[in-house]
Image: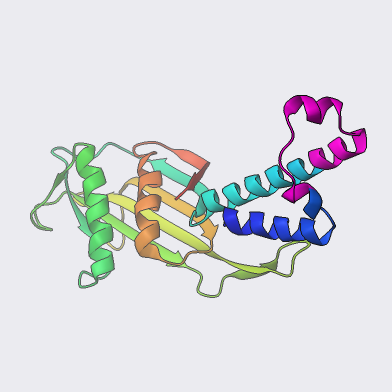
Amino acid sequence: MLLSNLMMLHSFLRLRGAHAFLDSPPPTLSHAMHCQPKRTRLRQTMIATICVRMLLISVGAISLAGCTFIDGTVSTAYYSAPPLPPMFIVISPDSLSLTERNISALIEAKLTERGLRKATSFEAANIGVLYKYSIDPLGRTYNIPGSPIFNTTYPRHFMIAMIDLRKSKMPEKVEYLWQAELYSEGSSRDISSLAPIFIEELFLSYGKSVTNKSFSLVQ
């Protein structure tokens, strides 16, 4: 990328009649400062400035290539401490799906880090953990101002709820322990890559109540 930009600049300068300057040997510092006319020195300064700017743009493009910006808001509600001993089970909407099993494993790991224990069966658990997510399949398409480029973003939602299985009489009564919701919008619809990020952001507010807490990161 850098070499291509410099070659393009070199061809441009030749077409503009600067080949004599490009092909001549570089003068010494004293000669450049004292012997050359001010107009020539100004031209060289402008050429050098163009080169530096093109290099910086190229480096910036290379640095940002492949990066994904993810931002959104998190809201959580803490109701009460989990029962003791805290034995949880993650209730997946589709236990046969590999994606759902991976998401369940991510949530299980976060709960285990916080001192809860995974139950061996539903009957042995006193905490039920449910999750749900959605991604708008149509998205929103908009035009970037001053550019012919159109971009499409997709609203995304991820929710986790912890309930007390002993006190709940589902579906009539649900005794919540902690709820967390995340809203985001971006170009990706890949829940497999988004779920680890969303779950991490949600569990940063585990055991707390927050409202529209903003987050922003680069993946």
- Measured from the top left, where is residue 146 in percent x and y? 78, 62
Q: Which residue is rendered at x = 73% and y = 50% of the image?
A: 23
- Considering the whole magenta stretch, tell me its main secondary structure: helix
- Measured from the top left, where is residue 116 in percent x and y? 18, 41
* Quarter of image, res 98: bottom left
Q: Which residue is rendered at x = 29% and y = 63% of the image?
A: 171
Q: Which residue is rendered at x = 19% and y = 36% of the image?
A: 115
Q: Nearer the viewer, residue 206 or 155?
A: 155
Q: Is residue 77 above or below residue 140?
A: above
Q: Nearer the viewer, residue 58 or 21?
A: 21
Residue reaching furthest front?
25
Stretch of the chain drawn in magenta: 21-45
Q: Nearer the viewer, residue 84 or 95?
A: 95
Tell me, yes or no, whether the highlighted magenta stretch contains residue 23.
yes
| Residue 169 is at least partly visible in this image | no
Q: Nearer the viewer, residue 188 or 31?
A: 31
Q: Is residue 81 above or below residue 143?
A: above
- Measured from the top left, where is residue 91 in percent x and y? 23, 61
Q: Which residue is rendered at x = 52% and y = 47% of the image?
A: 73
Q: How is the image coloured?
A: rainbow
